[in-house]
Amino acid sequence: MSETQTVTPGAAGTAGKNTGASILLDNVTKQYPGQAKPAVGGLTLEIPPGSIVMFVGPSGCGKTTTLKMINRLIEPTEGSIVLNGEDVTTMDGDKLRRRIGYVIQAGGLFPHMTVAANIGIVPKMLGWSKAEIAARVDELLELVSLDPALYRDRYPRELSGGQQQRVGVARALAADPPVLLMDEPFGAVDPITRQRLQDELLNIQSELNKTIVCVTHDFDEAVKLGDWIAVFDEGAQLVQYDSPERILANPANEFVENFIGSGAGLKQLTLTRVNEVELETALTAAPGDLASDVMSRLQGAGAQQAVVLDSRRRPIQWLTRRQLSRLERVSSTVDSKLPVIGDRATLNDALDTMLVSSAGAALVTGPRDVFLGLITVETVMQAITDAHEAALEGASAAPVGINSGLIERAHQYDDGGEGSVPEPATSAGGRE
Ligand SMILES: Nc1ncnc2c1ncn2[C@@H]1O[C@H](COP(=O)(O)OP(=O)(O)OP(=O)(O)O)[C@@H](O)[C@H]1O
Ligand SMILES: [Mg+2]
């Protein structure tokens, strides 16, 4: 197998019939007993079906409380939760939670159960047969890029942090729920693993189209993953709810500006994904090919390097003419230092990968790590030039989000023009 064309992966065969449900938090309040003020005050928030909504805000502002009210792990004191038009505020909580996947930091796996048993929990509760569960487990492990044969019988302690996180995502997806809730899912892993997990989530989402609500401390992560970002202040006061593009280009006030941090311009780079730019084709080769054949094809194409793909079309080597000249045949060795980037990654990540490898280009892969083509520094530069305007033009109207009782105050900000941070109504302070 050797050709000069790029490939597009076929539709993945994952059972994803349940695409995202709409979620409405309707004037929801959570007052913890003995607390001076509500953790969540009169929040109305529309979460469009099939979208990823990111919650950001300072520690203790009510993000987790808001998230857990959606699957009623925390019961709202007032207001209602509406899923796909159905009021689920009083339905059986356990039943509700089977329809909503939930991922927490470090995966939250049961340590005494194998990977397969962890993933199969909900299907088992739903009465699936053993064969159905086993098939689903393998399918999901493939989806999160873990080889089922290697990982299904391991215990969580035998996995790295990032692998546990993947299993956590697989478990949340097991019964194909229309909604996925994630609470700082990638908080505990190193930056590179985090980037991979983010890309994987976006890949999975492009296949499954769930409604995903995800809490993060990291504004860059919110920009990268979110279709919409909800910026909260204390008491889950919604300060801004809009597309990443518009929040970056037009933060509602100083509080949001501070949250975005420096380099708003550079963050725009994170708004364009690799799959939005045109990739360059590469000459490819397969293990076993005669080096002299590959060399003459390189010469014919005027190219300097050939990408070696394995039988599943995953890149394993990137050979220069010089390297080829020393070989008789292309080997099946896997080069662990290849500059590979997922097509869902941002241009920022792509640049990073190129800079680290000093290759001036990176190998782009799609779902299941299939090779798609090359991205170069020039492509990124060109894309930056166009990104800002294009992003703003493409943004559609934001979903509804407001706190009751705060509507008047919100207008005061508009008029005040001071860009001041909203102060909570009560005198009890203590933002962390
Ligand atoms: N069970 C509880 N009883 C009383 N107060 C609580 C309880 N759980 C949370 N709180 C309080 O409610 C507020 C919101 O908490 P929450 O966990 O939702 O914040 P968060 O935005 O997720 O914070 P972090 O970013 O630190 O995770 C905090 O002031 C917290 O102390
Ligand atoms: Mg929290």
Image (cartoon, rainbow, N blue to C red):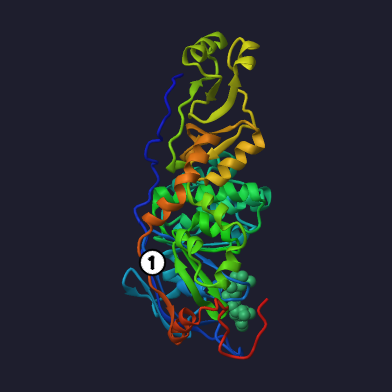
Question: As drawn, is 159 to the left or to the right of 5?
Answer: right
Tell me if mark 1 has few (under 14), some (14-19) or many (20+) residues whose alpha carbon lies within 10 angstroms of its own.
Answer: some
Numbered marks: total: 1
Name the residue rendered at 46%, 72% in the picture: 70
Viewer-closest of 283 and 165: 283
Picture coordinates of residue 21, whole percent (x, y): 36, 63
Q: Quadrant of the C terminus?
A: bottom right
Question: Which amino acid type is marked by label 1?
Answer: Ala
Q: Is residue 127 above or below residue 310?
A: below
Report whether residue 138 is seen.
Answer: no
Query: Where is residue 63 shown, x and y percent of the image?
Result: 55, 72
Q: Which residue is disc 1 drawn over? A: 398
Residue at image coords 46%, 81% = 415
Residue 86: quadrant of the picture: bottom left
Check the picture and name the quadrant holding the N terminus. top left
Height in image: 360 above or below 27?
Answer: above
Ligand 2 shows up in the quarter that is: bottom right
Residue at (37%, 40%) from the top-left corner?
11
Is disc 1 placed on a helix, strand or loop? loop
